[in-house]
Image (tube, rainbow, N blue to C red):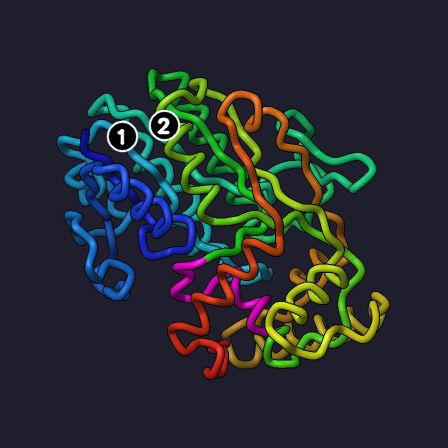
Amino acid sequence: MLTLVTGATGLVGNNVVRALISRGAAVRALVRSTADSRPFQGLDLEIVQGDVCDSDAVRRACHGVTRVVHSAGRVHLGFSGWAEARAVNVDGTRNVAAAAREVGARMVHVSSVDALGLGSRKNPGDEERAATGNVPCPYVLTKRDSERVLFDEVKQGLDAVIVNPVFVLGPWDWKPSSGRMLLEVARGRALLAPRGGNDFCDARNVAQTILTALERGKTGRRYILGGESLSYFEAWTLFAEITGARPPLARVGPIALWVAGAAGSAWGKVTGREPDVNLASIRMSLLEHHFRCDRARQELGYEPGTAREAATAAWQWFCERGYADQSLVA
């Protein structure tokens, strides 16, 4: 069976590619012409150039495949970039889902818990909670819309499931993406933690469960791939221990964070490039993002692992490739 993977240079997508190859599966990756080639070095797979926003390129990439893992996405936690977020997250998902349906391929759409309703540690969210409480930024809203697109295609005959990972850490984070948080702590830039929290899971476990979802996930069903629930203060303290960095000093109040976020958003309007610290990301950092993953455990055998395991693996990988000694790119 030939499996197409989109977003194959990303953290989740690259772990999926490697998990497939380790099982002896034939893999085809759809990548843009400008994509980094390092994630594929030494791997036995077929690479085809194209963009998920190009419906013809997606149809060509789907020719002859029996399974599709759609992990491509535009991730920016800010209020800018609406057009790009919609083009990639919504229209791109529509293109991939339609092409998969046309060739009769089974599909796993990699969404995010940010598309769902928020939960707390005392009352964690699940797959059925109404999608409320989160920040209405392009990423959140377009991930929700991407799921609506997917479910519409299922009604037309697409055999597909959705997985919603929490905050993912692990090796093969080439960009880096979510591993930036770990690197910020390692470089002593995270001394004041916001008051929110998140669930942290291992990219390798997410990838293995995506393959299980391809095999036995129930069509039209959503699965939260959860993790260990930590406040950001707890998570950053753990990251500091793992990396040998200085731990956060305290939890910072919302007023100081709002000021920093407003300054970041204002700077983004001046430069045309919104920084990571902006009003949307600050608002999200003050919220609790906690979820239960009973359904994935019971139906897919999902085991999220611990935040320590995931962060340790990520840090080891970053150190081996020199990321620990580099400055982060904004």
Q: Which mark is residue 160?
A: none
Q: Which mark is residue 214?
A: 2
In the rendering, at what x and y percent does residue 292 appear?
67, 33
Q: Is residue 59 above or below residue 40?
A: above
Magenta stretch containing residue 177, yes or no?
A: yes
In the rendering, at what x and y percent does residue 47 appear?
17, 51
Label 2 sits on a secondary structure element that is helix
The residue closer to the viewer here, 41 or 126, is 41
Q: Quadrant of the N terminus?
A: top left
Q: Amino acid at mark 2?
A: Leu
* Dots 1, 2 in contact, CB < 8 A: yes
Q: Which mark is residue 67?
A: 1
Q: Is residue 223 above or below residue 313?
A: above
**Left or right relative to 237: residue 74:** left
**Which residue sits at x=66%, y=60%?**
280
Q: Which stretch appears magenta?
A: 171-184
**Which residue sits at x=47%, y=42%?**
206
Q: CA distance from mark 1 to mark 2?
A: 7 Å
Q: Amino acid at mark 1?
A: Arg
**Which residue sits at x=83%, y=67%?**
251
**Occupied quadrant, residue 63:** top left
Residue 87 in sight here: no
Q: Is residue 29 above or below residue 171?
A: above
Label 1 sits on a secondary structure element that is strand
**Which residue sits at x=69%, y=56%?**
284
In the rendering, at what x and y percent does residue 244 appear?
63, 76
In the rendering, at what x and y percent does residue 250 appear?
83, 71
**Left or right relative to 27: residue 158:** right
**Left or right relative to 306: residue 317:** left
> If you read the primary sequence from the N terminus, does the residue marked by circle 1 or circle 2 appear first?
1
Residue 308 in sight here: yes
